Amino acid sequence: MYKGKSIGGIRSVLYTMKIGRKVGFINMIKTLLSKNSCKTCALGMGGQHGGMVNEQGHWPEICKKSVQSMASDMQAPITENFFNKYSIKDLKNFSPRELEQSGRLNFPVFLNSRSNHYSPISWEKAFEYIEKKIKKTIPNKSFFYFSGRSSNEAGFLLQLFARVYGTNHINNCSYYCHQASGVGLSKSLGNGTATVALEDLDYCDLFFLIGANPSSNHPRLLTKLKDIRKRGGKVIVVNPVVEKGLLKFSIPSNIKSLIFGSKIASEYIQVKPGGDLALFSGIAKYIISKNLIDSDFINNFTEDFNLYCSKIKKLTWKEIEYSSGIKKEEIEKIGNYYSISKNTIFSWCMGITHHPHGTATVQQIVNLALTRGMVGKKHAGLLPIRGHSNVQGMGSMGVTPKLKEEIFKRLMELDVLLPTIEGYDTLACINAADRNEIDFSFCLGGNLYGSNPDSELTSTSLSKIETIVYASTALNTGHVWGTGKNTLILPVLARDEEHQSTTQESMFNFVRLSDGGINRYKNLRSEVEIIAEIASRVLGDSNIFNWIKLKNHENIRKLIAQIIPDYNKIGMIDKTKKEFHITKRVLHKPIFSTKSGKAKFFYHHIPKPYYLKVNEFQLLSVRSEGQFNTVVYEEEDIYRGQDRRNIVLMNKSDMNKLNFLRDDKVVIKNDIGTMENIHVRPFEIKKGAVLMYYPEVNTLISQKVDPLSKTPGFKSMIVSVKKADSSYRKLKL
Ligand code: SF4
């Protein structure tokens, strides 16, 4: 039983007080109580129930992440003097946090290859420039990238404009996070999102938390996990890294938990990185060999079980144990918990999807759920833990290289001429830029450079693009390292500053309505206004689409209701104010949207093991407690007890073997890049694995992808770790 310190709690409360002092308590409370959905993670809170309220009406729903992003949006604006003072070369010396904290962008800025400084440009000149550049570009030589922080309205409108303009090179940040979940779930079940609603977590008796660290990234999920333990259920954590916040967490909104902490993990399975496919194959083998399957469910609602079953039976325990790093007895113990559970929920995050066999592992989790009929019933199911607050909505809105058949059909019925050429995924766009095949790119939020693997190659590829337009709230590394021959940054309103309401979709398929309405800065535009203006200038307004009229969000929502399947309730949301679950997504009955109407088993081989040489390790790239996605709010990671980011965390016995002492300087290297001046530190991590912080570590991540989802292996790189030699040390110290 874990007897260590509880994580979270009082420090989060103190942090919130500190932010309150900085931005003003009245301003902070006004923002937190406003009817806007949380701008950070996809768990979702806020909206029409009021700020800090979830879809079950529970209050207060707030965490440090939410406060961090709110504070960032409330900082003072950047002045013109800032851009006069700092050249691009200077800005390259800024850390991700320093760039973020330079202030809110408050006027458009422009940079060309003859200049070393961004300089202010008027909105009119910026629009004229963009119009001229797009008109000069062949549509297929352009791409459009979207982050998950934008609204459904902006996402829908921009993908529509891009397609009518003539390109399918439309993609979003999910290619670097949960694309494998979408692909795997769609093929297995006919739909690529969670099958459970938030309230199902209140009734399950077994919860698998796989390759995820919600204590840092989705803090409010911990309340649900605490409650599962409280009512006698089990939480099985599967993770190569022992995250203290998943052992014991202090939940600030619960006094008892705040003081004494709450136990989270009932069992902590320290799997090898990427060994989850083997682990879940092992649990399936146990369930099948003991005949603990739900035969009625399998016979009536699934297909291809026999083939799957015969393959699973042939796996040897030796293979399973070696590849998972977990002993047979431990796997059987977990299998036994599963066999007696009435309602199991399987959740996972990027520890699963960031491998070349990411989609295969997602489908193996689905298989395991199907063996016991844990999909298609109340209080049980599957939950990919999504990152950004509206990343799922982007997928729903058609922000994908290939449109869903139904969306394509409905657009064709409106007489829209759609491009048929194959669209590029995110990485394919970068590769096309590298081949000099891209002239224009529009990035709606996010940090494409920062999230992309192989930072050096990414920077070179982006620099070959004639024009890149970024729509952003604050500076990030992409504006500095991801510049094209010409680069424009357009400052946009944050969600709670919008002049019209917007909508967002949570990872529980719940659509929230955000009122916007907070007036902070004068010179910002809404994303929708910018997109509609560009579309109108480039394409002109027609009978099919009057882009100027589509500056009105209500008009966009009417179009979404008409075109996006199962989203019809959005058309009336301005009048009803009723937020809703998207039809057919939450599966409380075994009705699957596959062609056959049945869920499908997919067998995947356990990948061949790689045998690490001396000094070699498998690298896990992770986020810290002080950041969200590529945005770094604080240098320290208090949950892991780290005060800096240029560190590599390693198992103590691996350090001993290599004669490393804490804070020895090491060099981390592989075929992709080298990172120097890194401090090595001991940590509870599986032997043979090391952990470093994203996005800095992208220097070492290759562009090799999971062939099914096109997601790079952010947690599967092999690196060598060696002591910095003495001459190097002299140079750096
Ligand atoms: S858990 Fe996610 S949705 Fe909830 S308050 Fe925190 S960041 Fe926002």
Image (tube, grey):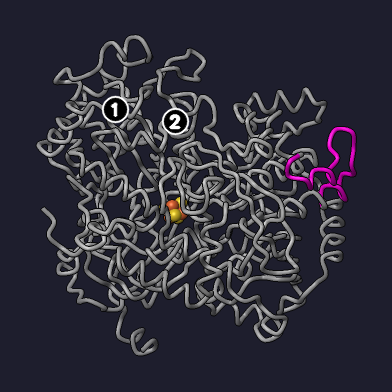
Q: Which mark is residue 113?
A: none
Q: Residue 541 colored magenta?
A: yes
Residue depicted at x 58% and y 60%:
447
The image quadrant of residue 720 is: bottom left
What is the C-alpha distance between the residues marked 1 and 2? 13 Å
* Image location (x, y in percent) of residue 449: 57, 61
Q: Is residue 431 among what the camera can see?
A: no
Left or right of 386 on screen, residue 312 = left
Task: Magenta stretch: give its range.
Answer: 534-554
* Image location (x, y in percent) of residue 294: 25, 16
Q: Residues within 10 Å of mark 2 (few under 14, many from 20)?
A: many
Q: Which residue is mark 2?
A: 185
**Quick one: SS at disc 1?**
helix
Quadrant including the C terminus: bottom left
The image quadrant of residue 2 is: bottom left
Q: Nearer the viewer, residue 250 or 563?
A: 250
Q: Which residue is mark 1?
A: 368
Left or right of 399 on screen, residue 333 = left
Examine the rendered structure and indicate whether residue 645 appears above or below residue 317: below
Examine the rendered structure and indicate whether residue 252 appears above or below residue 405: below
Q: Is residue 111 among what the camera can see?
A: yes
Residue depicted at x 39% and y 71%:
15
Q: Nearer the viewer, residue 583 or 650?
A: 583
Q: How many marks?
A: 2
Q: Amino acid at mark 2?
A: Leu
Left or right of 554 on screen, residue 130 = right
Q: Mark 1 vs mark 2: which is more N-terminal? A: 2
**Quick one: SS at disc 2?**
helix
* Image location (x, y in percent) of residue 253: 33, 57
